Image (cartoon, helix red, strand yellow):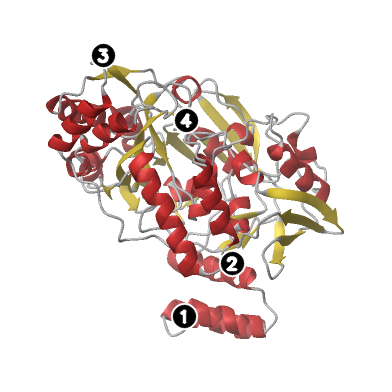
Amino acid sequence: MNDQLEYMTGQVAKGTMTRREFVGRAAALGVTAAVANTMLANNAQAASHGTPIRGGSIKIGSSGGESTNTLDPALTASSVPLDNLRHLYESLVEVSAEGDIVPRMAESFEASADAKTWAFKIRKGIQFHNGKDMTPDDVLKTMQRHSDENSKSGALGIMRGIENMKIDGDNLIVELGVGNADLPYLLADYHLMIQPGGGIDNPGAGIGTGPYTLEVDEPGVRHGFTRNENYWDADNRGFTDYNEVLVLNDATARTAALQSGQVQMINRVDPKVASLLNRAPNLSVQSVAGRGHYVFIAHVDTTPFDNNDLRLALKYAINREEMVDKILRGYGSIGNDMPINAAYPLFDETIEQREFSIEKAREHYAKSGHDGSPIVLRVADGAFAGAVDAASLFLETAKAAGIPLEIKREPNDGYWSEVWNKQPFCASYWGGRPVQDQMYSTAYLSTADWNDTRWKRPEFDAMLLEARAELDDGKRKAIYSKMGTMLRDEGGLILPMFNDFVDGVANNVGGWSADPNAELMNNKAPIKCWIKDA
């Protein structure tokens, strides 16, 4: 059977067999779809990048780090903490670059016909960094911790859809009140990393099952990781001896560190310098379009943003084409004040695109009855690449419409803990999610902790639950269309642009591959790549 599977993966690589055909034929040989997809992914990596080399080290220069960061997966909200999670922890399942669900701590899963009951079979023989075996009970307690209303977990909105969880032998059983065919995508959320005892006693200990163990933890400065010699999947991850994440929030400092060889990869290359940087002989710029978006968010429950005419005035006053041109330099596309674009399954391309209009902005501002006091927009360089420049462009077009926008520049350190999700109007970014249900559940469900626009509409929540229960794709698409239109016209999200993920990578890094899920190969580059001259 192994020879036949090897032959079939070769046919896929040559283009003479489709992925769907491979999965179907593999199933006839007794191979699950999840395992078949993993085989394809591993084969593609080997074919494209050669045999991994062990040894050496990778240093990452990353924006999105603060002195207030923690190793608690529940509280991860920016890039550096996510880089750390990928080194230390793993989730039940994960989403591949192709958008497929790939088993990790669960070796397989299956659902009832109505998608209300799911069984995840937990792998055996995997150890935590402290030497203890991972058990189904650890998985259950992890899920229960993120379901706790006091956890402040970024996954709390997702977990609220679960009615009951229990262990049955080697299986985690998840029971839903409303069927949801997308549940595995939800449980791939990066907050839901498996920890010993669920992380209840010490959630920030940094002890997981990942390919690296914690060596240095200096929040806001650097984090160091040593290869886990007992890692269960060492053939596919964890090739370097040591990795280090350096917090470099300043774009110029990140670029200089890559050019000088101080680091081997950086996130959020400033589009203004991307083409120039790509000409350097020792590195390349890697970009991939996805679901990430750069935004300005307003709390719809806070004056003056509780007035929809004021929100519409701000939305019409933003010149999306200008921002994509001047801020993204072509590394992205215009947004439409909803967090969904064509990269999502079931996207409705017929929703009308909002156009820049000084006249409509002026009209809605007059209708709002605003008293003319400054409307303060808080920004920082670390909010997204070009955030301060984007705010300046917004200021000029708003001024032309008679809107008294005022920009307040905040320090990078503390931005994600003291400004985002606390101040009523600020710049932010989202990496997006693989499916619409997860994006809406994380940031727009009334009860979600990360509802950063304070959008709380019972009718929206009801549509979200309706879409989950609907197994007909055409009907689900229609529901999502209504939800997207509602957010576009009434929400507190001002979304001028969807950004490409633009990273810088040294030429001596092997194993790099595009992943539209997030920057730096969905933040997995340091654990999946290797040094060619190690």
* Distance CA(mark 2)–CA(mark 3): 57 Å
- Residue type, mark 1 in image: Thr
Are the two marked residues, 4 and 1, in contact with CB atoms closer than 8 angstroms? no
Q: What residue is shown with label 1?
A: 18
| 2 or 1: tag closer to the N-terminus | 1
Q: Secondary structure at mark 3?
A: loop
Q: Is residue 276 left or right of residue 506?
A: left
Q: What residue do we see at 32% from left, 35% from top?
A: 385
Q: What residue is shown with label 2?
A: 38
Q: Secondary structure at mark 1?
A: loop
Question: Mark 2 or mark 1, which is nearer to you?
Answer: 1
| 4 or 1: tag closer to the N-terminus | 1
- Residue type, mark 3 in image: Ser
* Distance CA(mark 3)–CA(mark 1): 60 Å
| 3 or 1: tag closer to the N-terminus | 1
* Distance CA(mark 4)–CA(mark 3): 41 Å
Q: What residue do we see at 63% from left, 51% from top?
A: 187
Q: Is residue 28 left or right of residue 357?
A: right
| 4 or 3: tag closer to the N-terminus | 4
Badge 1: residue crowd in 10 Å (few <14, some 14–19, many ≥20): some
| 4 or 2: tag closer to the N-terminus | 2
**Where is residue 395 drawn, in percent x and y?**
20, 25
Quarter occupied by residue 153: top right
Question: Mark 2 or mark 3, which is nearer to you?
Answer: 3
- Residue type, mark 2 in image: Thr
Q: Residue furthest right?
A: 169
Q: What residue is shown with label 3?
A: 373
**Where is residue 177 drawn, in percent x and y?**
70, 54
Q: What residue do we see at 60% from left, 60% from top?
A: 469
Q: What residue is shown with label 4?
A: 246
